[in-house]
Image: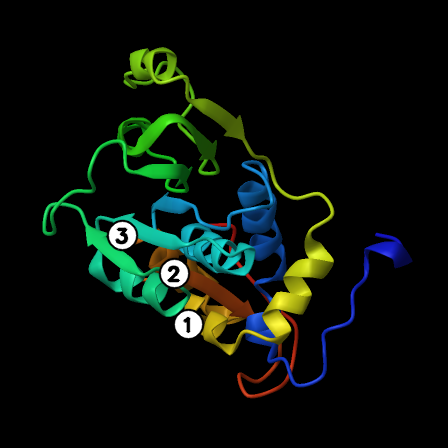
């Protein structure tokens, strides 16, 4: 690490929120793959995990006209609503989104079924950003409509120049606190990873690197 990679945490920003700088930069970078001008656009976010919820915040920052969050679990959808999703759709419970009704779809779950849903959801000439990490190998995805609808698909990997923007957004968006659902001490690291792996049990799980839970210290997140 060199000096140019260091960033100041703005005064008054709690460290648990500051720990979101890297994943928020990832979300900002992903959203930018479909362009920076979202004014008037309808956007569907497939997957309301940490990256999906942060993508919702990024889309609100970009001025998207309507943001719809889609997930299997109810709890993360509440966080997506708090961060700017106007509509939350719980799969298997709510009415599915209408086909061909979104200008952009952000696939943030890494699920082949969600990618198929995104292909179905966008309008002809629409754009999909593959932000979630898909499984390796052959995937059961119907790609025929990509040709018929002339859909553009952009991959997104990590972040580039978005870290400073992410820190600025964190500083003025207290609602981002809701993305962090659990903070464990380092001695409870196994429990932290188990919680992060349990479906629907958490969003962002952090490890507090300090001798005492109440001390101020840098919090770091399991990469889950």
Question: In the image, what residue occupies the spot 88% across and 53% down?
Answer: 2
Measured in 3D between alpha carbons, the distance from the residue under mark 2 to the one under mark 1, in whole angstroms, is 9 Å
Q: Where is residue 24? Give x, y as percent.
A: 57, 56
Tell me the residue that label 1 is attached to: 178
Question: In the image, what residue occupies the spot 50% across and 70% down?
Answer: 187
Closer to the eye: label 2 or 1: 1
Q: Secondary structure at mark 2?
A: loop
Decide: is 185 above or below 123.
below
Measured in 3D between alpha carbons, the distance from the residue under mark 2 to the one under mark 3, in whole angstroms, is 10 Å
Tell me the residue that label 2 is attached to: 203
Tell me the residue that label 3 is attached to: 199
Residue farthest right in this picture: 3
Q: Nearer the viewer, residue 224 or 49?
A: 49
Question: In the image, what residue occupies the spot 25% across and 57% down?
Answer: 88
In the rendered structure, which disc, 3 or 1, sits on the residue that comes first in sequence?
A: 1
Q: Where is residue 109? Give x, y as percent.
A: 37, 41
Decide: is 174 above or below 111.
below
């Amino acid at each position: 690490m060199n000096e140019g990679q260091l960033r100041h945490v703005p005064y008054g920003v709690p460290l648990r929120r500051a720990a979101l700088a890297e994943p928020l930069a990832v979300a900002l970078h992903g959203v930018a793959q479909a362009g920076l001008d979202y004014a008037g656009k309808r956007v569907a976010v497939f997957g309301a995990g940490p990256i999906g919820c942060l993508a919702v915040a990024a889309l609100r920052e970009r001025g998207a006209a309507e943001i719809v969050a889609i997930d299997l679990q109810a709890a993360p959808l509440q966080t997506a609503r708090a961060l700017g999703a106007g509509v939350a759709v719980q799969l298997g419970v709510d009415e599915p989104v209408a086909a061909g009704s979104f200008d952009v779809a952000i696939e943030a779950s890494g699920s082949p079924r969600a990618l198929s849903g995104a292909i179905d959801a966008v309008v002809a000439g629409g754009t999909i950003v593959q932000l979630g990490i898909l499984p390796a190998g052959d995937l059961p995805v119907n790609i025929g409509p990509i040709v018929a609808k002339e859909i553009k698909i952009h991959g997104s990997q990590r972040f580039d120049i978005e870290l400073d923007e992410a820190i600025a957004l964190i500083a003025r968006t207290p609602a981002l606190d809701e993305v962090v659902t659990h903070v464990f001490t380092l001695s409870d690291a196994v429990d932290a990873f188990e919680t992060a792996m349990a479906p629907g049990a958490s969003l962002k799980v952090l490890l507090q690197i300090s001798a005492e839970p109440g001390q101020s210290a840098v919090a770091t997140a399991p990469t889950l």
